[in-house]
Image: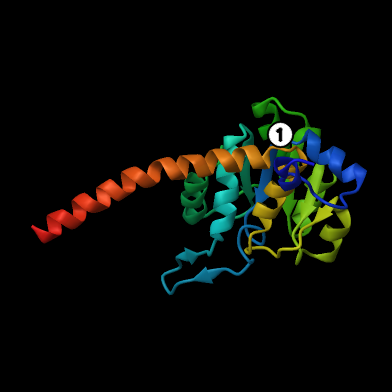
Amino acid sequence: MSPQHSRDTVPDLPDDLRQRCLAIRAIISDVDGVLTNGQLWLSERGYELKAFHVRDGMGCLLWKKAGYRLGLLSKRRSVVVEQRAREMGVDQVIQGVGPKWPAVESVLNMWGLSRYELCYVGDDLPDISVLQQVGLGVAVADAAWDVRTAAHYVTTAPGGWGALREVIELVLRTQRLWSTLLDSYLAEERGNAGSDRKNCAVITASHIF
């Protein structure tokens, strides 16, 4: 096996899960409890704070490089989520929804995708209706027991600690796209390193003189 294929191999993956991963063209993720650890921090003035994991953002960058769709779905409304979504290159942010499946179905119609081409990641009871409908339903490691039971795959990472990144790598490695995307990203970084050094030199010189 070539080095590239070895990086794209997910060992001991059941055939049913492999087939589900191969069909995926989009991910929609819950926010609280998946991108965060589920805790809500409220200031004295009522401002809501959330902590996100940087590795999820890096994974989303490679997911978008693959040409795939990405969405976030939450029953709550938060300006912080909109800001993080922009940073992650999210295509669709749906907040303040009631039942989640109708909202997901609407996005799929907008994207022109079938439910079998969608991976959904959740952690709590409102997510079950979606997990049972899509091609790949994923629960984070610390999801509610009923959610983990309903999912096709349970991450090793808990919510807020890179669970979405784990899902992205699972799908892209199974589709043997991870190595190509990673090599492309690293090549871009090496190309940018030279210009960054030049900029640093100019800045340093301006401070000296």
42 left or right, relative to 60: left
Q: Nearer the viewer, residue 170 or 70?
A: 170
User: Percent position (x, y) of residue 19?
Assistant: 86, 38
Q: Nearer the viewer, residue 10 or 59?
A: 10
Residue 76 is at least partly visible in this image: yes
User: Percent position (x, y) of residue 45?
Assistant: 41, 70
- Name the residue at 46% across, 50% down: 83
Amino acid type assigned to the residue bearing label 1 in the image = Arg
Residue 43, above or below 7: below
Disc count in the image? 1
110 left or right, relative to 191: right
Q: Secondary structure at mark 1?
A: loop
User: Percent position (x, y) of residue 203?
Assistant: 20, 53
Task: Examine the image and state in which quarter residue 184 appears.
Answer: top right
107 left or right, relative to 128: left
Residue at the extreme left of the image, as rendered: 209
Residue 135 is at least partly visible in this image: no
Q: Which residue is mark 1?
A: 25
Q: Residues within 10 Å of mark 1 (few under 14, many from 20)?
A: many
- Name the residue at 45% across, 68% down: 46
User: Percent position (x, y) of residue 70?
Assistant: 62, 40
